[in-house]
Image (spheres, grey):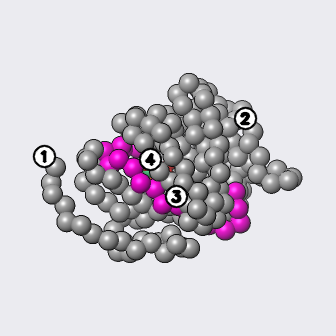
Amino acid sequence: MSQMLEPFTSLVDLRLGTVEPRRDVVERRLSDMRGMYLEEPAGGGDPLVYTVYGIPVPETGDNVMSSTTVLEPGTVGREFYMTKGHRHEVRDRAEVYFTLAGEGRLVLATDDGDVRVEEMHRGTVNYVPGNWAHRSVNVGGLPLVFFAAYVADAGHDYGTIEEHGFPVLVVAGDGGPEVVDNPRYSG
Ligand code: S6P
Ligand code: ZN
């Protein structure tokens, strides 16, 4: 039997994506993304790429975990700033993304190399079925802010993406964002 929780309420700043009360904040910098971009980052410093503000609950299959992600605008070479991307450790666990601000793309891939790229902008609700690895990409000039909710025992498996990457990349083209094959993808 799971522990009985008390109801609680959090407040999300819809533009900034911050969550009050602040309970579990994870920052990812460019140095945390080593090897994930085709090109080596140019320039000095170690800029912030994204922040995840968690609303933690016990990691059991009868709870719903949620968080906001604030993904900064920027590029490394032609590739836009993105999250690391992951599969869920419990593969079939699904997830919902609700975008609050900014403009992005959600890249999804199965183990068989099936791939989808979905739009993210204020108001979009992306359904991430189980068994689809997922990564979000900021293709705009402002922070991309979205709320995510998922089965709390899902867990995160980053290793597969670190090793194989996604089949496609989202890059800055002359007329806006473009989806191109990832030359380094090893499915
Ligand atoms: C969790 C959900 C998001 C991401 C967050 C950061 O299942 O998909 O909260 O954790 O957007 O991405 P990543 O790939 O670094 O966990
Ligand atoms: Zn996820």
Left or right: 50 as drawn, with respect to 56 = right
- The residue at which mark 3 appears reads as 98
In space, the residues marked 2 and 4 are separated at their CA atoms by 25 Å
Amino acid under label 2? Asp
Dot 3 or dot 1, earlier in sequence: 1
What span is colored magenta in the figure?
Answer: 139-157
Dot 1 or dot 4, earlier in sequence: 1
**Is the residue indicated by label 4 positioned so its CB lies within 8 Å of ligand 2?**
yes
Residue 181's label in the rendered image is 2
In space, the residues marked 3 and 2 are separated at their CA atoms by 27 Å
- The residue at which mark 4 appears reads as 95
Task: Report helix, strand or loop for mark 2.
Answer: strand
Instruction: Report x, y in % for residue 126.
Output: 54, 50
Occupied quadrant, residue 75:
bottom right
In space, the residues marked 3 and 1 are separated at their CA atoms by 31 Å
Amino acid under label 3? Phe
Contact between labelled residues 4 and 2, with CB atoms less than 8 Å apart: no
- The residue at which mark 1 appears reads as 1
Crowd band around label 2 with a 10 angstrom C-alpha radius: few (<14), some (14–19), many (20+): few
Crowd band around label 4 with a 10 angstrom C-alpha radius: few (<14), some (14–19), many (20+): many
Contact between labelled residues 4 and 1, with CB atoms less than 8 Å apart: no
Instruction: Report x, y in % for residue 57.
Output: 28, 57
Amino acid under label 1? Met
Task: Report helix, strand or loop for mark 3.
Answer: strand
